Amino acid sequence: MTAARSLGDVAAPAADDRCSSCPHPLSAHDAIARRFCTATAAGGFSRGCTCATKPETTE
């Protein structure tokens, strides 16, 4: 079993793992965040991030 990762305290992602829409690495995105960020980049939108920064909470 792997430990859950918090996206709130991530180091700068490697160039090949960088999301073009938010500061989080692509490898840390769940399915919803990856789809949201992909659509944000494809549509040329500037909108907030949907990444779960604290997966242990529901806020």
Image: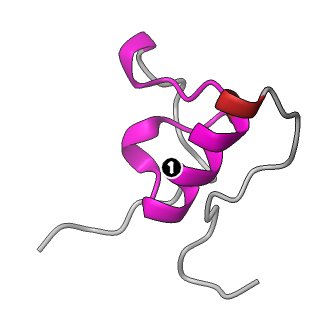
Which residue lies at the image location 47% right of the left edge and 52% below the top edge? 29
Q: Is residue 16 left or right of residue 20?
A: left
Q: Nearer the viewer, residue 24 or 43?
A: 43
Query: Residue 57: x and y, percent?
Result: 63, 85
Q: Residue at x 87, y 43 (%)?
A: 47
Q: Residue at x 84, y 49 (%)?
A: 48
Compared across the picture, whether 22 is left or right of 56 comes to: right
Q: Is residue 7 highlighted in magenta?
A: no
Instruction: Estimate how packed mark 1 is, as few (under 14), some (14 to 19) or many (20 or more) residues with alpha carbons within 10 Å.
Output: some
Seen in the picture, residue 58 relative to 4 is either above or below; the reply is below
Q: Residue at x 41, y 17 (%)?
A: 14
Res 37 quadrant in image = top right
Residue extending farthest front = 43
The residue under label 1 is 34
Task: Tell me, yes or no, whether the highlighted magenta stretch contains residue 32.
Answer: yes
Which percent across, then down, holds residue 11?
52, 31
Residue 8 percent coordinates (x, y): 63, 53
What secondary structure is the magenta-colored segment mainly?
A: helix
Disc 1 residue type (three-letter): Arg
Range of magenta residues: 15-40
Q: Is residue 12 above or below residue 38?
A: above
Say left or right for 30 vs 41: left
22 w.r.t. 20: above or below: below
